[in-house]
Amino acid sequence: MRRIKLELTYDGTNYKGWQRQSQVPSIQETLERTLGKILGEPVVVTGSGRTDAGVHALKQVAAFTTTSGLSAEVFQRALNGFLPQDIRILRVEEVPLCFHPIADAIAKRYRYLIDNNRPLFPLTRNYCWVYGEPLDIDTMRQAAQFLLGKQDFSCFQSQGSPRKTTIRTISDILVERINDLNGLYPPLICIEVESDGFLYNMMRTIAGTLTLLGVEGHRGVGNPERMKEIIASQNRAFAGATAPAHALYLIDVVYP
């Protein structure tokens, strides 16, 4: 038996998330079906975690077990030859049989993009949250610093996927305006968070909460320290809206 690790990127627009579901397209099901064609046998692919419907990945990690003798290079060429063009395999390598994409990961990093420009730039509308009200990025940046460290983040968890504990450690967070490709796209607000784990909809709710505080900051009534009160409440009702899925990107999965 061999364990094969995949690093892949995908546009999640046409999929109902990572996880295999009945009668709807998913990234996992598409990979398994394609590998089944290549190998002539059923294949189960395990990902480093679920991404919701419409969420994208710049780097997702998955693995499967096989008795095939195909090399990593052949696997990569074959998969990219048969997969739809919105899923690409970046790297393939053989790893120890004990490798597990979820259990062995020590951190993940997500990016959330907000287009706060006017007029609307049409090329970003399907890949950014087009937010109409002005935002004070300094307030958002200051508020984000209160998210660092080991804390109970239950205020950012949506119902539907309970976890044993709502305590997570955020090791890095940034909020900045970014310019892309020498002005091909307008400046976008980028929120990035790296944590040892994410609760259900945690990243999208963090983005929604920072945006709420950014609106208040622009209106002159903002207080970045309100983020501390929101976290301490441990109450989802105190946080901001769950931001749309189509502006969220899994950008890295970290292993020892």
Image (cartoon, rainbow, N blue to C red):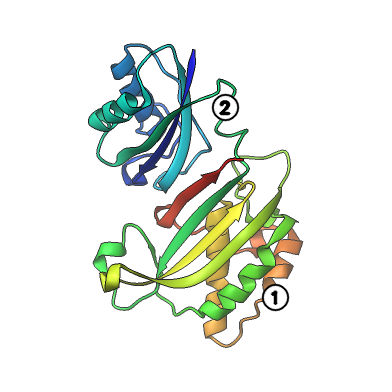
The local crowd at label 2, few if under 14, some if 14 to 19, many if 20 or more residues have their Cα within 10 Å, is some
Q: Nearer the viewer, mark 2 or mark 1?
A: 2
* Type of amino acid under label 1: Glu
Toward the bottom, the furthest residue is: 220
Res. 23 visible in picture: no
Q: Which mark is residue 225?
A: 1
* Type of amino acid under label 2: Phe
Asked if residue 166 is positioned above or below residue 184 in the image, the reply reads above
Query: Residue 241 appears at what percent x and percent y?
Result: 54, 62
Which residue is located at x 43 percent, y 77 percent?
Answer: 133
Which residue is located at x 43 percent, y 63 percent?
Answer: 113
Q: Is residue 50 left or right of residue 144?
A: left
Q: Is residue 119 left or right of residue 206?
A: left
Question: Which image quadrant is residue 255 in?
Answer: top right
Asked if residue 117 is positioned above or below residue 241 in the image, the reply reads below
Res. 43 visible in picture: yes
SS category of the residue bearing label 1: loop
Q: Nearer the viewer, residue 39 or 247?
A: 39
Q: Which residue is mark 2?
A: 99
Which residue is located at x 53 percent, y 36 percent?
Answer: 48
Q: Nearer the viewer, residue 229 or 98?
A: 98
